[in-house]
Image: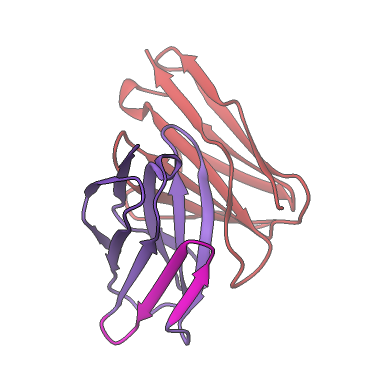
Amino acid sequence: SQQGEEDPQALSIQEGENATMNCSYKTSINNLQWYRQNSGRGLVHLILIRSNEREKHSGRLRVTLDTSKKSSSLLITASRAADTASYFCATDNTDKLIFGTGTRLQVFP
Amino acid sequence: GAVVSQHPSWVICKSGTSVKIECRSLDFQATTMFWYRQFPKQSLMLMATSNEGSKATYEQGVEKDKFLINHASLTLSTLTVTSAHPEDSSFYICSARGGVNSPLHFGNGTRLTVT
């Protein structure tokens, strides 16, 4: 399977804490993307990092990419209860997007 | 931002019937649309990639005669689940993008229940 692996599978934290999710993949990529999914809904695009980039920020989100290790991380700082959702990385090799296994994040108020 | 509309949002059908799901890009032209399937608490599994005006490319293990995909225009792709069975019950999500290195925009998904 080409599917990437994410860890942890589930993460529970208190509001205000930081949440870090990791993604590992197997193939070469054009870019890597992170998405969020609320239960039973479609996905919302969070951030895209190209293969020649190492770090990217967007608001409270920070994404890193290490192509030599074929891994990426998503950091959510100062988490809020509204951040509770599933988070997926997805690798893009131009012709299709393959999703990782996902991390279920629960943020307690 | 770019909007993808998926319809219906949920459908219940009897075993043996066919169900059509529509995916429309509302404010951009989608050269490529993707269809995913998601089981509860699992990730999205790519079923097929459809390019406007050509046959869809199916992932390994996906029956093309069972999951018919038509991408007749730059704004519409349809997935038809033919002769549905209870094991086809799942959450089906479409996505679309306008070009290479563009993020995907997702529909809100269709929950199919086959009784």
Q: Is residue A103 above or below residue A38?
A: below
Q: Is residue A3 visible?
A: no
Q: Which residue corresponds to the image point at 46% horizontal and 73% vertical from the top-left?
A: A93
Q: Quadrant of residue A76?
A: bottom left
Residue B66: x and y, percent? 44, 36
Residue B6: x and y, percent? 62, 35
Most common secondary structure along the magenta stretch: strand
Residue B35: x and y, percent? 50, 47
Q: Which residue corresponds to the image point at 54% horizontal and 33% vertical from the top-left?
A: B80
Query: For the magenta stretch, what is the residue range?
Result: A55-69
Image quarter where the C terminus of chain B lies is: top left
Q: Is residue A4 above or below residue B56?
A: below
Whether residue B6 sits left or right of residue B111 in the image: it is right
Q: Is residue A16 above or below residue B66?
A: below
Residue B56 lies in the magenta stretch: no
Whether residue B63 sits left or right of residue A68 in the image: it is right
Residue A65: x and y, percent? 37, 78
Q: Which residue corresponds to the image point at 30% horizontal and 27% vertical from the top-left?
A: B87
Q: Quadrant of residue B58?
A: bottom left
Q: Is residue A40 visible?
A: yes
**Chain B palette colour:** red
Q: Among the chains, which one is purple? A: A
